[in-house]
Image (cartoon, rainbow, N blue to C red):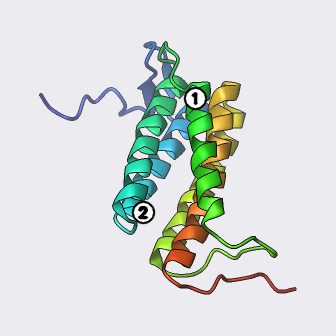
Amino acid sequence: MAIYTKTGDKGETSLANGERVPKTDVRIEAYGTIDELSSCIGLLRVALDAAQSEQLGWIQNKLFNIGAALSAARGEWIKEEDVLQLEQWIDILQSQTPKQHAFVLPAGGEAVCRCHVCRTVCRRAERRMIEAQSDAILLRFINRLSDYLFVLARRAGHQNGEKEAIWEK
């Protein structure tokens, strides 16, 4: 079977429910940004330890589910326990880093910087999902994910003995 279908050659694509929409549709923008985020997370995984990479693999699967939901596929793609899982990981990561006393700049070693790139793409995905009027549970998951990526960046820096980049007025 060929990878190309030629059905998108005129600037349209199909949603999971069969509806044809322009490739500029807000839903396509939203799940395209989710796909970009997942790719960025794939790059981040190689810079972290096995336990963190495993968590990020779980997150990538959830992001694929969000893409399905945004594509109008039927089903319950994200659940309350998924949001709670992220909150649990955030709490653990925060317990492993010093208390934050200032704004943190997105700088540091490679793992820290990759975390921050993922975080900013996540925030853009959230904005696109709001434009697409996504379900509240999807938005809560993405909102928590950006928090997770922020504390993961801090943890990665402290784990590697890096001095945190702090904003100075």
Mark 1 closeness class: few <14, some 14–19, many ≥20 residues within 10 Å? few
| Residue 37: image location, x then y, percent | 49, 50
What label sits on residue 44 in the rendered view? Answer: 2
Give the camera-side residue of 130 and 107: 107
Residue designated by label 1: 81
Q: Is residue 130 left or right of residue 42?
A: right
Q: Is residue 160 left or right of residue 166?
A: left
Circle 1 — which element? helix
Looking at the image, which residue is at 69% across and 44% down? 127
Give the camera-side residue of 136 and 144: 144
Q: Residue furthest left?
A: 1
* Quarter residue 166 falls in: bottom right
Position of the N terminus, as image quadrant, is top left
Mark 2 closeness class: few <14, some 14–19, many ≥20 residues within 10 Å? many
Give the camera-side residue of 15 and 154: 154
Q: Residue furthest right?
A: 169
Residue 75 in view here: yes
| Residue 72: image location, x then y, percent | 52, 19
Comparing labels 2 and 1, the label whose residue is closer to the camera: 1
* Quarter residue 137 falls in: top right
Looking at the image, which residue is at 47% across and 17% down? 73
Give the camera-side residue of 155 and 136: 155
| Residue 24: image location, x then y, percent | 56, 37
Query: Which residue type carries mark 2?
Result: Leu
Circle 2 — which element? helix
| Residue 7: image location, x then y, percent | 33, 26
When the figure is inspected, residue 98 is found, relative to residue 15, above or below; the finding is: below
Query: Which residue type carries mark 1?
Result: Glu
When the figure is inspected, residue 37 is found, relative to residue 163, above or below; the finding is: above
Question: Sequence order check: which comes first, mark 2 or mark 1?
Answer: 2
Looking at the image, which residue is at 81% across and 75% down? 101
The CA span between labels 2 and 1 is 24 Å
